[in-house]
Image (spheres, grey):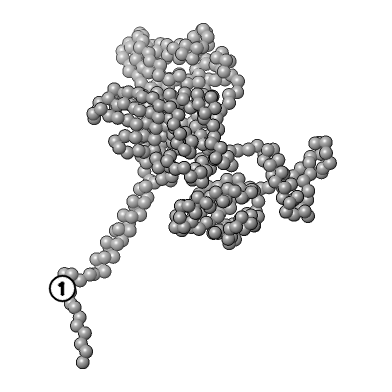
Amino acid sequence: MLTIARHSFPQSQRFSWRFAAPVLLVLAVLGAASLWAQVAGERGIAPVASSTDIEVSGIEVNVTGDNPQDAREKGWLEAQRLAWARIDGPSIPDSRLQSLVSAIVVEEERLGPRRYIARLGIIFDRSRAGALLGAGGARTRSAPMLTLPVMLTGGSATMFEYRNPWQRAWAEYQFGSSTVDYVRPSGAGGESLLLTFGQTGRRSRAWWNSVLDQFGAADVLVPVARLEHAWPGGPITGHFTARYGPDNRFLAQFTMRADGPAQLPDMLRRAVARFDELFQRALADGTLRPDPTLTLDNIEISPEIRALIEAGRAAEVSATEDPTRPQLTLPADSGQAGTQPVQAPTVSAIIVQAATPDARSFDATLTGLRSIGGVRGLSVSSTAIGGTSVVQVNYAGSLQDLAAALRAAGWQVTVGNNALAISR
């Protein structure tokens, strides 16, 4: 008779699912909490609303008066005079000068029984002060520039992973009078995962186009602040570098110094103002312009220009692909025969699910979608390298039209409910 021996484990070594189930449940909860912690919490600083008013900051006053209120009023009036002189304003009475001021920003103040010491910011209304300063006309501004402030300190590089003084300086600065159109993300929610220091080192135009589309920008600016602490609580040296474009090109650099942590915010505010001067100068000399390798589908085009573009495309299609389609007609007031102008097609948001087994196929998918005629822009809803990525495509046409265009470009297309699944 064949006998099969069974090995018996000691009671202490036997595995019990009664204890494993609670452990697995705790691990699942901790895993979900760690994923949520990557986007939750105090991460972003919302930028202040930019106005076109003229702001002069860092005005220091030290005056005396009969009482604290009188000293403060004299200090504010003195600050207005100094700010007006700093922007080369003409000589005007104090009563008229006060009518040009829209706000006074108290940066720091100390009030005594008869003395007022403060650092103030004066904001002049451009509509009233512009004529006196010779700046009342329209100004040319740059294309929208996505601004990614990078802070290097303690061997780490951060942007929006946590609230830091460098991002705060950019968020709270008033750029209303600047000729550069800064697009400043808040860093809240999923932006802290998308906009990281690693993004500044990417060279893929498909990746950059996807990011710029989501923020309505044409190019990118990267102001870098590298902070060196002499000792805890001691002087801080800031090395600042201005970079721009998807290739992270060098523009300029400078150095500033703060006597201690209390003076760090003021140093960073002055650094932001210096960066703004550098970027405005680069814009004026033609250095700072949108990279030609980036698409500008996310930039708004007037309906008239958009209609002309669509009319030209419709004429090409009617002449080459389908002779039975109605021919392009011109408006009656153009001097040529015609009945009605060609209307621009409606732009629809269509979900496209694409198989992306590797990073190269993901880049090829975004590039291929952008090359389809009628695509006005796209944004990546979900990235899954090794799976199926989801992209929202803004297309001038219907779902069936986009499916046909993708099949003509060599894609395998499956049509669903307001969605397409594509693969190579």
Nearest to the observer: residue 244 or residue 30: 244
Drawn side of residue 380 relative to residue 30, left or right: right
Observer able to see residue 139: yes
Drawn side of residue 309 relative to residue 59, left or right: right
Q: Quadrant of the N terminus?
A: bottom left
Q: Residue at x 65, y 51 (%)?
A: 397
Density class for disc 1 (Cα within 10 Å; few <14, some 14-19, many ≥20) is few
Q: Residue at x 65, y 37 (%)?
A: 302
Q: Is residue 19 above or below residue 250?
A: below
Name the element at disc 1.
Answer: loop
Q: Is residue 166 above or below residue 93?
A: below
Q: Residue at x 28, y 65 (%)?
A: 21
Q: Is residue 43 above or below residue 62?
A: below
Q: Quadrant of the C terminus?
A: bottom right
Q: Residue at x 74, y 47 (%)?
A: 315
Q: Give the x, y percent position of residue 313.
A: 70, 46
Name the residue beneath numbered marker 1.
10
Q: Give the x, y percent position of residue 276.
A: 46, 26
Residue reaching furthest to the bottom: 1
Q: Amino acid at mark 1?
A: Pro
